[in-house]
Amino acid sequence: MGFWEEQAKKHASQSDQPDQNRGKNPSYPKLAVVLITAVALFLFVTYGPLRGSSPATSVTLSSATQAIAAHHVASAVVDDQSQLLTLHLKNGTVEQTPFPYTYGTTLTKDLLASGAKVSASAAQGQNILISLLQLSFPVILIIAFLLYFMRKHGGLGVTRFSSGKDSAVKVPSTRFTDIAGSPEVVRELEEVVEFLHNPTRFTAAGARLPHGFLLVGPPGTGKTLLAQAVAGEAGVPFFALAGSDFVEAYVGVGAARVRTVFEKAKKAGRAIIFIDEIDAIGRSRSSGPTNAGQQEHENTLIALLSEMQGFSNHQIIILAATNRPDVLDRALTRPGRFDRTIEVPAPDRKARLDILRLHARGLRMDDAVNLESLARRTVGMTGADLSQLLNEAALESARRQESAISPGAVEAAYRVTTIGRERRSAALSEKDQRITAYHEAGHAVAALLLPDVENPVSVSIIPTGRAGGVTWMGGRDDNYSTKSQLLQELVVMLGGRAGEMCLLNGDFTQGAASDLKAATDQCTNMITRFGMGKSGMAVLEAGSHPFETMSKEVKAEVNEMIAEAFDRAKSLLRQHSGLHGEVATALLEREELSEQELCAIAERWLNDPVSKTADTGILSTQEAARN
Ligand code: ATP
């Protein structure tokens, strides 16, 4: 059910990055002053003293008509255009009321009949000024907006701008000691720091240090952090940009931004420019016809290339990050540009432990928390994931009102970040619980029995995230997987469905969907990429392998490989039905079993030859179904 679920998605916290940009842009206050003045002027003109020479009391139309009928009106202004009637009464007061469309003629007749002096509209001189200002107000607003836009985006013909992300000149406080698990990368970047500190050491020997470094690695592996640390160690300003900042719908904006950033860096003399997601601007240019978007993208790329060409006299280093170096334009990676590539891989077990230790330093951790075991179980997690996991543990610990972060809080955080929150209150029928227990026990027993698969760290039938139960595997850090290892992992993946069949007389549920997906992916890779199938060693399909696009032969082989592994899983559980049954029963009683508890049960069964063949009743029903 939850077995072989995807590892936690990246929720990299960017909180450590210096917030260089907020509140630094001087154009915002200026614009605010212009807008406030314009609005104040508008209100003044519309409602202020210019509007009328004497303050008029607002009255209802019926009260106005009564005053007319009672001959109280000395003079009146009937403004048909704005449908406004102004009455100057004989007692000196002025009253005003709006009147309905076309009613002006009737009012004029009544006023003339009452003997009042009538004029057709308000004082014209005053209205022309008001109307002019009222008409020009929207125009002023549009011009202000355009000015703001041009300043912000540097576009529409304006090549200088000061705004947003790139404007701040700040030396970060990050140091190499804030980075764990990447000693080789740090060593390589120390040379950059040395160059910024002491350029003559390099130039005296006639050497030219590369000024473009490409940091290549998956998201969350600390590329931004490394770039900040280089600037921090060298004590130089750090200009950070994301490639997506340049991808604008307006032609010329991206190129203008590139020029502005380089200008600022040149002004600073020594600087680090960091371009995150460089693939967003650095994708290889197309040779065919281009649309406006591609044209803009190419202009930006060309601007970047020419700027990189032109600053050899400055101590400016550009660090760019990407996880798609394959899509970069070759002009970007040629000597003189990004000619040094530094791999920043996802951390291995030791690196994960170092990162966990580093982030745990700032937290109050219970001594019982085993970071080694956590590092072992977090295969595939990046530095960002690990820092998020520990933060989640701290939050969980606070929720539990603990004085120090306990192993329980860390375990809960691990589960939340990998599969999701436990749903202990989910109402499960007894039947569902039994199916889950046999399913998870199937995975666990297969893993315990197969020699090249790590033991499960724990098994649980507590609904977690979208899964009914979970078998938490230990995880393997080896770079290489043998065919035999991969096939054994496949058997473990299919152990869940095999386990259900033991309980349900050969029947099964939909609960193995995610296991089957993982198994299909694994077999597909083995056959089409790793040369581990019967079809031979040729790489059969490039890129990703959606099942529906595969050739008939590959599909048949994937199915065959899955079927063989499934048969192995079924026969393993049949052979060790006693062990399977006991693990399932223990799960139903305790809901969760640790690695030690699982091993204790397994040892009891495997060391006792009688027990090995003991029949819990499951074997016979399963056999019956098979026959
Ligand atoms: P992206 O490619 O998504 O921009 P990134 O590779 O630039 O990600 P960072 O933004 O540098 O990753 O990392 C995010 C956070 O993860 C850091 O602020 C830090 O807390 C943590 N982190 C990542 N790698 C490490 C590491 N090697 N050591 C310590 N902390 C790390």
Image (tube, rainbow, N blue to C red):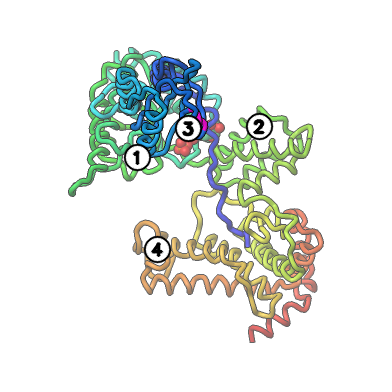
Q: CA distance from mark 1 to mark 3?
A: 71 Å
Q: CA distance from mark 4 to mark 2?
A: 42 Å
Q: Can you identify the residue that label 1 sits on?
A: 280
Whether label 2 lies within 8 Å of ligand 1 gets the answer: no
Q: Closer to the camera: disc 4 or disc 2? A: 2
Identified by mark 3, the residue type is: Thr
Asked if 296 appears above or below 490 in the picture, the reply is above
Q: Residue at x 72, y 57 (%)?
A: 462
Q: Closer to the camera: disc 4 or disc 3? A: 3
Q: CA distance from mark 4 to mark 1?
A: 30 Å
Asked if 74 appears above or below 12 in the picture, the reply is above
Q: Are marks 1 and 3 in contact (CB under 8 Å)?
A: no
SS state under label 2: helix
Q: Is residue 620 visible?
A: yes
SS state under label 4: helix
**Upstream in the sequence, badge 3 or badge 2?**
3
Q: Closer to the camera: disc 3 or disc 2? A: 3
Q: Closer to the camera: disc 4 or disc 1? A: 1
Q: Can you identify the residue that label 4 sits on?
A: 528
User: Between residues 437 and 191, which one lies in front from this camera angle?
Assistant: 437
Q: Can you identify the residue that label 2 sits on?
A: 360
Q: Residues within 10 Å of mark 1 (few under 14, many from 20)?
A: some
Label ID, residue 65: 3
Asked if 327 appears above or below 259 in the picture, the reply is below
Magenta span:
63-67
Q: Residue at x 65, y 39 (%)?
A: 392
Q: Quadrant of the C terminus?
A: bottom right
